[in-house]
Amino acid sequence: MEFLGTTQTANYCGPKKACGFSALPPAVPASEIQECYQPYYLPGYRYLNSWRPSLFYKISNAQTCMDEGATCRSALRPPTILPALRSALFCRYSPHDWDRSNELQMRGAEASRLWASRLTGDSMRLMQDKDQLTRQMQEGTSRNLGQRLSDIGFWKSELGYELERLLKENHSLETVKRRLECAAEELNCPLQVALECLYHREKRIGIDLVHDNVEKNLIREVDLLKCCQEQMRKLAQRIDIQMRDNRDAQHALERDFEDKTSAQFIDEQCFNLRNTSDCISFFHGVEKVDGTISVPETWAKFSNDNIRHSQNMRANSIRLREEAENLFENLSDQMWKQFTHTNLAFSARISEVTDAKNKLQTQLAKARERGVHHRRHLADPQAETAGDTGHAAAAGNDQVPAGARAGHQGQHTLHRQGEVHEHAQDLPQHAAPGGLHLSRCCQPLASCSAPVPCAA
C-alpha cells in the first residue's frame, strides 16, 4: 500500500526479491500490449505530475531470481514510509539539473523575446503596409469622387440648359396655340358677314335673283373661311398633343435633375469626409450592400437619352410653330385675295346696277314727261289737232326736197315716212282712251322698286 500521489523513483523503493517458488511464472502472451492513454488538455492546464522532477523519473522493472527452482513472480509493493521523508528525498536536484534548468529558461526567454521582436516588426510592417494601402485607397476614392462630382455637375448643367430651352419652347408653343384659337374665333365675324350677305341677296325679286360673280365670290369666301377655321383647329389640336409630349419630356428632365442634385449632395459629403471628421462610425458589412441599378455607362446613357428626347420634342415644336406661321401667312393671303375679289365683284355689280338704274330713271323721266305732255294736249284737243296738222304738213314738205337728191343720196327715209303716217292716223284718235293707255304704260315704270337691266 502506498500513499496517494507518491511515485517509485528510488532504487530502494523497488520490490523485494521473492525466491522460493518452485515454478516459473506464466509467460505473458506477446500479443498482449499495455496501451497508454494520454488525455488531451488545453494549453495552460497544470498537469498532476508537473511537480515531479525529470531526473531519476523511472519505474523499475520487476526483478526475478532463481532460488532452488523458485521464480519471483510479479513485483511486490514497496514498504510504506513517511510522507515527509519521501517528499524530502524526491525534491532534491543536482547542480547540473539546476544549471541546465536555468540555461533552458534563459534560452526560452531569449527565443520568446526574439519571436516577440519579430512579431512586433511584422506587426509594424503590416500596419505600415495597411496604412499606406489605406491612404492609397482613400486617395483613389477621393479622386473617383471628384471625377464623379465633375460628371454629375456636367450632366446637371446639360439637363438644366435643356430644361430651360424646353420651357421656353413650351411657352412659345402655347402662345402659337392661343393665336390659332383666337384667329379661328375671329374668323366667325367675316364668316357671319358673308353669310348675311348671301342671306340678304336672297331677298331680291324677280329677274334680279341672278347667280352673278358676287354670289360666287361670297360662296367661295364662306368656304375659304370655314376651311381656314378647320385647318387652324386641327393644327391647334396637333400643338396640344405636342405640348403633352413636351410636358412628359419636361417631367423626365426635372426628375433626372433632382436625382443628380441629390447624388451631388451625397458625393460632396463623402468627398469632404476625413479621418478626423466627427460622427464617423464603422458599419460592418456595408460594402456588401449593392443598391445600384446601373453602371456608369448606362447612367450617362440615361441622361443622354433624356436630353435627346427633349431635343426631338423641341424640334417637333419648332416645326409646328413654323407650320403655324406659314399657315397664318398663306391663309391671310388667300382670305385677303378672296376678300379683294369679292369687293371687286361687288363694285362691278354695283356699277352695273347703278348704270341700269340711271338708265331706267332716265327712261322713267322721259315717259313721265311724255305723259304730262299728252295730258296737256288732251286738255286742249283742238290745239293738239292744229299742232298735229302743222307737223304733218311739215313732214310732207320735207319729203318733197328729199326726192330731188341725186344719185345714191335719194334714199328712202323710213323715219320721215313713219312720222307722216303717225300724225295722219292719230289725229282723229286724240281722246280719253288714248290718254288712259299712255298712263298705263307709265305706271309700271314708276312702280319699279328694283333696278332691272334693259337694252339701250
Image (cartoon, rainbow, N blue to C red):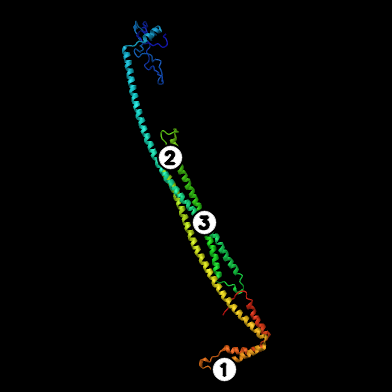
Q: Quadrant of residue 93?
A: top left
Residue 150 location in percent, x, y? 40, 43
Residue under the point 42% across and 37% down: 272
Residue bearing the label numbered 3: 177
- The tag earlier along the polypeptide, 2 or 1, is 2
Q: Nearer the viewer, mark 1 or mark 3?
A: 1
| Dot 3 amino acid type | Lys
On screen, residue 238 above or below 151: below
The disc, 2 or 3, on the residue closer to the chain's N-terminal end is 3
**Tag 1: residue type?**
Val
Of circles 2 and 1, which is in front? 1
Q: Quadrant of residue 219?
A: bottom right
What is the spatial separation of the Cα atoms under label 1 and label 3, in whole angstroms? 90 Å
How far apart in space, not on screen, are marks 2 and 3 (Cα)?
44 Å
Q: Which residue is mark 2?
A: 268
Q: Name the residue that disc number 1 marks.
A: 400
Alpha-carbon distance for marks 2 and 1? 132 Å
Q: Earlier in the sequence, mark 1 or mark 3?
A: 3
Q: Are marks 2 and 3 in contact (CB under 8 Å)?
A: no
Question: Which residue in the rendered view is the most extreme toward the right?
Answer: 432
